[in-house]
Image (cartoon, helix red, strand yellow):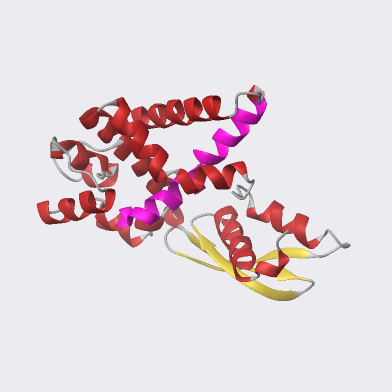
Amino acid sequence: MKSDLQLQELENKLKLNFSDKDLLKTAITHSSFANQKKKVEFNERLEFLGDSVLQLIISEHLYSRFTQKPEGYLTKIRSLIVCENSLCDIANSWELGIYMNMSKGEEITGGRNRVSILADCVEAVLAAIYLDKGIEYSKAFILNNFKTTIEKAINNEIILDYKTKLQEIFQQNGEVNICYELVKFEGPPHRRKFFVNILINDCVKGSGQGFSKKEAEQNAAKEVMESADDIRE
């Protein structure tokens, strides 16, 4: 369990002070940690609430901001703002992974950097803030912390599927052969880690790893896009 000093460090990064510290402790506790300890609450219930709080505040913001836009547009922009990739970026900006309580096994297999775990933890933290501070404080906090994410979504700068986007970019000027090659995998069957290379016209242009081949391929495509700004639209 994280110490009071570490909790204070996290509060400082969030720029707030919890009245009920137990809410924050629960928000950063993964189920793998709670399963090894007696009477320790983990963050899944808070995650459930936080998802609704975030959806409501972002929906209201977009509804008020874009008074002439149809439902379909608002739904699309909201989905980009609240998607796992966006929430993971928020988590990384808070360095949330280093403060999470999780089992050694989960940590060894990359839990502190796993997109789904970090995204869920952000939602749990937002719920903790809502319960501790109320809706108006939560609204101000979310709109401030998600400001860059909101603008990126509006400008269509958030990518959900790196493989598809990479394919679209490279094939703008003709047919290009893009394939993903499984290099190796490690770990037990229930927690395999996959390593892949991405080949463009038979030349290795990047690599990626993940706990599924799909995740590894997405990470490889993301690496290529982030290391070659000139290929973007």
Q: Is residue 32 above or below residue 227?
A: above
Nearer to me, 35 or 91: 91
User: Along the horizontal axis of the image, is 70 left or right of 49?
Assistant: right
Q: What's the residue at 54%, 25% (across, down)?
A: 63
Q: Is residue 90 above or below residue 177?
A: above
Query: How far from the left and from the top, in percent, is residue 177?
Result: 81, 65
Q: Is residue 67 above or below residue 80?
A: above
Query: How far from the left and from the top, in percent, is residue 33?
Result: 23, 47
Q: What's the residue at 28%, 37% (across, down)?
A: 43
Our reading of the magenta stretch's main secondary structure is: helix
Query: How far from the left and from the top, in percent, is residue 145?
Result: 39, 45
- Magenta stretch, residue numbers: 72-97
Pick out the residue farthest to the right. 174
User: Along the horizontal axis of the image, is 185 left or right of 190?
Assistant: right
Q: Is residue 12 above or below residue 226?
A: above
Q: Where is residue 40, by image quadrant? A: top left
Nearer to me, 168 or 111: 168
Pick out the residue farthest to the bottom. 203
Query: How far from the left and from the top, in percent, is residue 168?
Result: 77, 55
**Quadrant assignment for the C terminus:** bottom right
Q: Is residue 10 visible?
A: yes
Q: What's the residue at 26%, 40% (across, down)?
A: 27
Nearer to me, 71 or 201: 71
